[in-house]
Structures are given as structure tokens and as C-alpha cells.
Image (cartoon, rainbow, N blue to C red):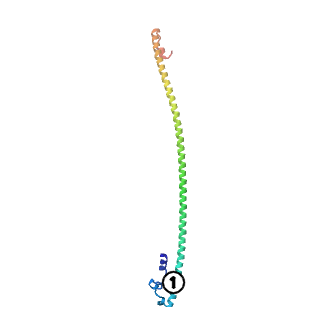
Amino acid sequence: LSLIFGVLSSSAHLNPSTMMSPSHADTPSRTMSPSKSTVGGANMKRSIAALQEESRRQNGRLATVEGTVDGLVQSTKQGENGFRDAITALQERLEKQMREIHEEHQHRFSLQVAENKRLLVHLNAQKAEMQALQKRIVALEDRVTFLEAEIGDDDHVQGAGDSDFQSGNL
């Protein structure tokens, strides 16, 4: 209704003096002359035609606006789908990279564990060898001490010189 009243008030074809006010609607048409009633009827027909034309123009504008809105809605949906696809692709790529990084770290960790085990075995072997050598050194030191004591007793008895023992000519 506001559209119709707006069209009525904005229409240049309408003459406010030809329109009937609510107070004149109940009065008999005897106050109007026959020539005025045909002029009023013609004005009314022009007003109705103007309203119909304005209604058609507004319907055309409405259809244009609806088409534009539908296009914008469709573009928005396509944009949302495009963004959703891009985000999904990015998420999948990041997940793939994270899996690859995780697998690489697991591989490096297993290599490091294997290297640690190898080094531990080597270290234990070195310790065992060192302990064996220390035992042998202690045994040799004991033997040298024993031999020195024995040679020392023999030197007094036989008179052999310590110079041969010290020079390594034994």
C-alpha cells in the first residue's frame, strides 16, 4: 500500500483537486456537473493507467534486483565452496607433510637407537678388553716382581750382573 500511495503522491499526472476526499465520497454526485464527472473519470483512468505502468516498472526493477541478489548468492556460494576446497586442500597438504616429518623423525630415531646400541656394545667390548689388559698388566707386574726377587736372590748367589737384566739381554 505504501508503494501505491507513494506512486500516487509522486505521479505528475494526478491532480489533487480531481481526487475525491473521504468526506466527499458519501455526498451525492449532484454537486458535480456531468462534464466534471467525465473529466474526473478520465483522470481516474489516467491515474489507474499510471499506477499500472509504475507497478510494471517496479516489478521490472524488482525482478532485476532479485536477479542480482540471486547472482550474488550464487557467487557467494561458489566463493564459499572455493574457500572450503582451498582450505581442505591446504589441510590435507599439511597433514601429509606432518606425516612425512613424523615418519622421518621416527626413522632417524630408530637409526639413532641402533647407533646407540652399537656404540654401547663397542664401549662394553673396550671396557672388557681394558679390564683384561689391566689384569694382564697386574699379572705381569707380579711376575716381574717375582722374577726380580728371584734374580736378586740369584745375583747374590751367582754374582751375575744386573747390567744384563737392565739392558734387556736376558
Furthest-top residue in this view = 157
Residue at image point 53% right, 42% down: 106
Question: Eyeballing the image, is 46 above or below 168?
Answer: below
Find residue 76 and report its horizontal and vertical position in percent: 53, 62
**89 left or right of 22 in image:** right
In the figure, 12 relative to 159: above or below? below
> Is residue 161 shown above or below 36?
above
Nearer to us in this view, 149 or 81: 81
Most foreground residue, 103 or 159: 103
Q: Position of residue 10 (x, y in %)?
A: 48, 79
Secondary structure of the residue carrying numbered label 1: helix
The residue at the point 54 percent across, 68 percent down is: 68
Alpha-carbon neighbours of circle 1 within 10 Å: few (<14), some, or many (≥20)? some
Name the amino acid, label 1.
Met
Q: Which residue is drawn at 48% across and 90% down?
A: 30
The residue positioned 52% from the left and 79% from the top of the image is 51
Give the mark count. 1
**What residue is pinned by disc 1?**
44
Which of the 4 image quarters holds residue 70? bottom right
Q: Where 85 sits versus 119, above or below?
A: below
Q: Position of residue 163 (x, y in %)?
A: 47, 14
- Residue 103: where, in percent of width, then height? 54, 44
